[in-house]
Image (cartoon, helix red, strand yellow):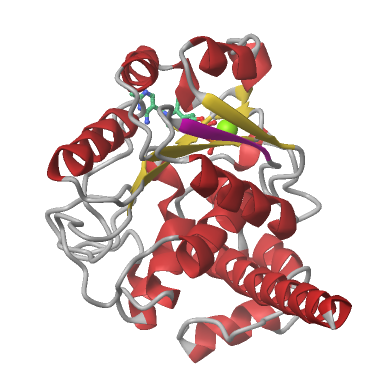
Amino acid sequence: MEAVLEEKSTDQAAQRIHQLEQIATQVRRDVLWMTYLARSGHPGGSLSAADFLVALYFDVMDIHPPHFQMDSIGEDAFILSNGHICPAWYSVLARRGYFPLEELATFRRIHSRLQGHPATLEGLPGVRIATGSLGQGLSVAVGLALGKRLRKDPHIVYCMVGDGELQEGQIWEAIAFAGHYQIDNLIVAVDWNNQQIDGQVEHVMSLGDLPARWRALRWTVIEVAEGNQMAQVLQALYQARTLAFQGKPIVLLLRTHMGYPIDFMLDNHRWHGVPPNREQLRAALAQLPETLGDFPIPETIRQEVLSQ
Ligand SMILES: Cc1ncc(C[n+]2csc(CCOP(=O)(O)OP(=O)(O)O)c2C)c(N)n1
Ligand SMILES: [Mg+2]
């Protein structure tokens, strides 16, 4: 009997992972379409971070869309510190029900709520702080987590940072603060794709022994060998949740790939902040099945891209 039950739950877990992978594939298509339509934006990091964002929003966080509350009282919260990868975040927010899917077509347009870096003035549900000036979002996440602790709100604050962003000085003050003051309702994920705007992170300015640095500042470190494999990302997130509220903040070091899984974008920093042109979009979309349906795109443009 036990064996049967175990088999069933393994089956269910595999099914869930498959569903999340399907969502992540669609999010990646959204990223490519959005940056193409806007003729600007940051596809590379959006594609490397997509699996984490999908796992977080569709399986892990205790959240209540579409009733977005700015103060996040009584729910988990997320801060995207590396704000430039907002195409992936906007797609996840829309598909999770925070705002209409149609709005993805307005990315980077004047008067759109979907600005090139997340901002609060436009009132986009899901966004709690403007980010994009690198290094600041983690400090905000630490403050938010501290606020939840003071209020005795037993929820978790999640934050994503880029690995290039870890070259910012302010990041290390926030890390030291959270470790010292035992901010243990905080889970941070690093999109460790080893690429940034000007080249490989290790070439531009080495981060040294990254796991050791976080550990030295009193964080629990979880390394994820394949940060673009949904099963690994999900398992790490659940492990992190079980380790929360035990006196230490937690960091997931996700080994990801810029541009994943598009063959001509993979591990190439040149895709940090350049949109695909028409031929590149067509080639990239051919590598990603339309799992959930693209967001509404004007038919003439769709035909232009998809028909040779
Ligand atoms: C304070 C600040 N300095 C510089 C920049 C310019 N900038 C934008 S993205 C980026 C590189 C970030 O690298 P990473 O976090 O690894 O993002 P990825 O390239 O992997 O998407 C830089 C230097 C910025 N946005 N903010
Ligand atoms: Mg990077």
Q: Is residue 253 magenta?
A: yes
Q: Name the spot of residue 181 as percent of width and height, x first.
A: 29, 19
- Residue 178, x across and y down, in percent: 34, 23
Residue located at (72% from left, 51% from top): 232
Q: Is residue 226 visible?
A: yes
Image quadrant in which the N terminus is located: bottom right
Query: Relative to 233, does residue 105 appear above or below in the rendering?
Result: below
Q: Residue at x 37, y 43 (%)?
A: 83
173 relative position to 284: left or right: left
The residue positioned 67% from the left and 81% from the top of the image is 290
**Ligand 2: image quarter:** top right
| Residue 37 visible somewhere in the drawing | no
Locate the C terminus by quadrant: bottom right
Could you tell me which residue is drawn at 39 percent across and 19 percent down? Answer: 179
Magenta highlight range = 250-255
In terms of image quadrants, where is residue 220?
top right
